[in-house]
Image (cartoon, rainbow, N blue to C red):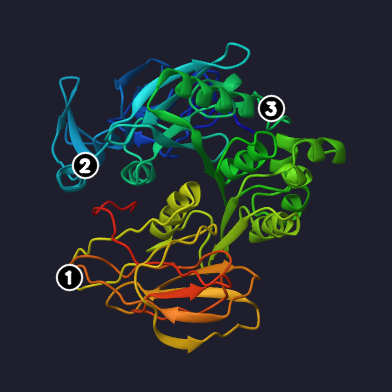
């Protein structure tokens, strides 16, 4: 578990394998490929302290770094004497370059429209000491304008993975909505040596929790424009674990997003497709060890309003993890909501899933409505705009309700929000579960925008389950008589 990938060479006729790379300091498994360059050299990518480097190895054991620096190399190929590289950095989601005289000669600029039309916020690299003095490395994506800015602490999955300084679309969306985004690589992450990655073996939620909170505190202390009174925390997979674990220990966060989380080591062992080894390696195998590192075992300590997000066909972190965590929060009286994406797995977002999840994330951490729109790449057509209010703060009504229809309560009391995704009538659906009541349902008048997709998602926590057909924007009136409102989307920034 959390072992760096090494490169080996062995005679073609058989024999012993010889390791060519330093397994303690290099991790060559980030894309799982070995590209050949001529008859006696191989090209591999190396995770290195928030970057991804390109290295060339020879059978003799000699190797050299061909591409380094503040970028993440995503691929390489050598043909006809040329070496072509694909990469991402702070200004591009991905471009192609040729290695010429030891320097990259960039051939494309695919992100130019993104920079000119939407704008890109380049991350600020930071390092702060943890409680024991260990350096914690990461980035701050600061939104434009004067502060104080609300803060999102974003935790990556894995845990043996890493954030990089390359353009991260989700962080850009959150920054566009006015949030300062903090991302770091605590102990347990990849790219900082094998000892760093294995530091939380059988002790998840210890040094990693210490590190992410130290990074948060360091950033708050360093930057006066960050609002320490408006903090949100979020993460997916292992990041969902550490988010749920954090809010059971630290109650300063206004809201939390627990996405596709590893939340109960006991049931995870028998239900995840990763196999039974994972939980044992990270949380230990005894009942006492698992309970000491289980968010479900500490759910009664949670006070933070939480949005739980999961995909229905997630086999890696099965949906029962999110269902049971959400149910426990509701039973304990903690403000919570649950979004489920039917037909999606842990890492197959599909059209609209990430857009909807990002909108839900910005909404839940602010406690207020956030809207978004998506630019069409082909024929433009008008769409609708809707407030997405995921964790229960209901916006004042912006228009009079129209076309009153009697409320309808599906047998499962699940609100299925569906809207058309494109002109081929593909559908992107999300499922929002809640068992509260409401008196009636209304359709809000829509406003038209010349280049936006239909917006999915308009459902306050304390409203009734209802069905939203494609092309309609509907809002539920709560028992208190308040309704959600239609409001304008922010600029054409989208996460996919």
Q: Earlier in the sequence, mark 1 or mark 3?
A: 3
Q: CA distance from mark 2 to mark 3?
A: 38 Å
Question: Quick one: 105 or 88, which is closer to the camera?
Answer: 88
Front tag of 2 and 3: 2
Mark closer to the chain start, 2 or 3: 2
In this view, 395 is above or below 404:
above
Q: Residue at x 38, y 32 (%)?
A: 148
Q: Dot 2: what SS?
A: loop
Alpha carbon distance from label 1 to label 3: 50 Å
Q: Which residue is mark 2?
A: 119
Label 1 crowding class (10 Å Cα cut-off): few <14, some 14-19, many 20+? Answer: few
Quadrant in the picture for residue 121: top left
| Circle number at residue 206 | 3
Assign a secondary structure to mark 1.
loop
Q: Earlier in the sequence, mark 1 or mark 2?
A: 2
- The reply, left or right, for residue 112 in relation to residue 313 is left
């Amino acid at each position: 578990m959390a072992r760096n990938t090494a490169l080996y060479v062995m005679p073609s006729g058989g024999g012993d394998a010889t390791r060519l790379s330093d397994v303690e300091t290099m991790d060559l498994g980030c894309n799982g490929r070995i590209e050949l360059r001529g008859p006696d050299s191989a090209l591999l990518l190396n995770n290195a302290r928030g970057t991804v480097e390109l290295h060339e190895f020879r059978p003799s054991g000699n190797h050299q770094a061909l591409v380094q620096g503040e970028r993440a190399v995503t691929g390489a190929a050598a043909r006809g004497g040329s070496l072509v590289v694909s990469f991402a950095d702070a200004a591009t989601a991905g471009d192609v370059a040729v290695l010429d005289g030891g320097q990259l000669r960039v051939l494309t600029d695919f992100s130019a429209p993104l920079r000119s039309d939407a704008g890109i916020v380049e991350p600020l690299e930071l390092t702060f000491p943890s409680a024991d003095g260990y350096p914690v490395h990461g980035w701050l994506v600061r939104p434009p304008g004067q502060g104080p800015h609300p803060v999102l602490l974003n935790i990556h999955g894995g845990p043996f993975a890493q954030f990089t300084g390359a353009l991260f679309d989700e962080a850009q969306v959150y920054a566009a909505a006015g949030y300062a985004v903090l991302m770091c690589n605590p102990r347990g992450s990849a790219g900082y040596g094998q000892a760093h990655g294995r530091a939380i073996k059988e002790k998840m939620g210890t040094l990693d929790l210490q590190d992410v909170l130290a990074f948060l505190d360091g950033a708050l202390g360093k930057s006066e424009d960050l609002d320490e009174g408006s903090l949100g925390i979020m993460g997916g997979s292992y990041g969902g674990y550490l988010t749920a674990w954090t809010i059971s220990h630290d109650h300063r966060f206004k809201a939390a997003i627990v996405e596709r989380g590893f939340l109960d080591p006991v049931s995870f062992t028998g239900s995840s497709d990763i196999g039974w080894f994972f939980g044992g390696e990270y949380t230990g195998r005894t009942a006492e060890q698992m309970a000491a590192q289980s968010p479900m075992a500490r759910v009664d300590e949670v006070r933070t309003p939480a949005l739980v997000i999961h995909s229905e066909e997630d086999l890696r972190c099965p949906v029962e993890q999110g269902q049971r965590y959400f149910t426990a929060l509701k039973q304990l009286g903690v403000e919570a909501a649950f979004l489920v994406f039917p037909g999606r797995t842990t890492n197959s977002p599909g059209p609209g899933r990430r857009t909807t999840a990002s909108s839900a994330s910005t909404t839940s951490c602010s406690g207020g409505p956030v809207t978004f729109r998506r630019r069409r790449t082909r024929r433009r057509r008008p769409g609708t705009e809707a407030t997405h209010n995921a964790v229960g703060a209901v916006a004042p009504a912006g228009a009079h309700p129209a076309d009153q229809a009697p409320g309808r309560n599906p047998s499962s009391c699940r609100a299925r929000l569906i809207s058309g995704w494109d002109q081929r009538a593909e559908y992107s659906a999300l499922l929002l579960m809640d068992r509260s009541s409401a008196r009636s349902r209304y359709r809000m008048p829509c406003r038209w925008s010349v280049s936006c997709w239909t917006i999915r998602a308009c459902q306050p926590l304390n409203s009734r389950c209802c069905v939203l057909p494609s092309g309609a924007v509907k809002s539920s009136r709560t028992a208190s008589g308040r309704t959600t409102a239609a409001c304008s989307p922010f600029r054409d920034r989208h996460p996919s």
